[in-house]
Image (cartoon, grey):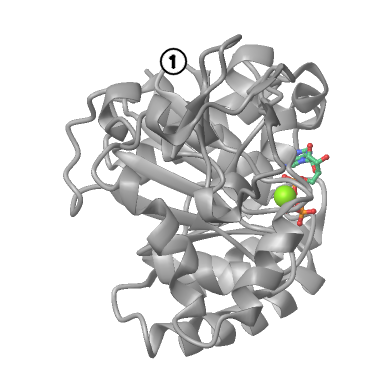
Amino acid sequence: MIIVCPSCKRQHKVDESRLSDKVKAAKCVFCGHKFPIPKPGDVETEPPAVAEALPAAEATASSMRRIAVSLSKGGVGKTTTAVNLAAGLALAGFNVLLVDTDTQGQASYMLGVKPKAGLTELMTGELIPQECLVKARERLWLLAGGRALAGVKRLIARKDFRGEMTLSEALTPFEGQFDYVVVDTSPGWDVLTINVLFYVREVLIPVSLEVMTIQGLLEFSRSLASVQNYHRDLTLKYVVPTFLDKRVKQSEEILQQLTSYYNSRMCPPIRYNVRLSEAPGYGKTIYEYAPGSPGAKDYRDLVRRVAGNDELLS
Ligand SMILES: Nc1ncnc2c1ncn2[C@@H]1O[C@H](COP(=O)(O)OP(=O)(O)OP(=O)(O)O)[C@@H](O)[C@H]1O
Ligand SMILES: [Mg+2]
């Protein structure tokens, strides 16, 4: 059943079968208000359509692009890329859903929002889908990650059947609601990463220009290939060099090697730019914090590349 908080008017999906007779009051996860639980006859039984709460995207289920930003190695710029790609696409006029599947929950921090709910509540079915989203910017919606996702991983691991489809099933209500779904992944390789790769059709790999990352890229490509055996629509679409520093000889050499290997999949590099590391501290995207910086320019180039339109954001 759906219970509406009498204070903030937000909706909560409650599994009646798990409510014992002794539970008489509820606490709203959004505003903290405590209130008596209404009797079943007093409440709405059907959740409102998700479309009511979301912008009317022109996407259809098949045209909605789903892009994972992923690499097992940590600190290569996944979250910075996911956030600034998603925010840039939204600035360019697309409706975008950013999904943070990392227990670090850094996408919210980078966007300066403090969601009370997110991907965990969606995947456990605790809340109705639109209550799990937060509107972070104009046309940009966030399904936040965070520590509670650890419990979701356990839940997936316990499933006997179709565990790898748990995320895809949870995201079904948003099908066709957005032009782009950008998914940030955590470092490492776990059940949630596998779920992301079964959900998306495109993978964007940020590669920091260091020898160790190239090693990680080879390992990740092998793991990706093992998922592709079961999910034929999955393609490694973009390789994005990050932390390019022209003063470092090795950085240029690795860039050349990557370009010769990945050729058409290579994207314009993201330079090392201190503004990119400062922006999250202010809860701002690079376009808001330092619109004239090399970091903002590089991410605008990436947005144009992904959208396939050189005219955007110019
Ligand atoms: N091009 C860049 N220039 C300078 N600093 C950057 C750049 N890209 C990212 N950073 C900074 O580097 C750090 C790591 O970036 P980020 O968090 O995006 O990596 P990540 O791959 O998501 O890490 P994790 O694997 O832990 O999730 C952050 O402090 C970020 O602000
Ligand atoms: Mg990250």
Query: Which residue matches tag 1?
Result: 138
Vertical relation: 97 (above or below) 61: above
Q: Residue at x 40, y 52 (%)?
A: 171
Does the image show residue 93?
no
Estimate how packed mark 1 is, as few (under 14), some (14 to 19) or many (20 or more) residues with alpha carbons within 10 Å.
Answer: some
Say which element carries label 1: loop
- Amino acid on which the number 1 mark rests in the picture: Glu
Numbered disc total: 1
Q: Residue at x 81, y 46 (%)?
A: 247
Does the image show residue 82?
yes
Vertical relation: 47 (above or below) 210: above
Picture quadrant of ligand 1: top right
**Residue 78 placement (x, y as % from top left):** 65, 51
Pick whichever, 164 or 16, lies toward us.
16
**Residue 303 placement (x, y as % from top left):** 42, 36
Quarter of the picture containing the N terminus is top left
Q: Residue at x 72, y 76 (%)?
A: 216
Q: Residue furthest top?
A: 7
Q: Residue at x 59, y 25 (%)?
A: 296
Q: Is residue 220 left or right of residue 68?
A: right
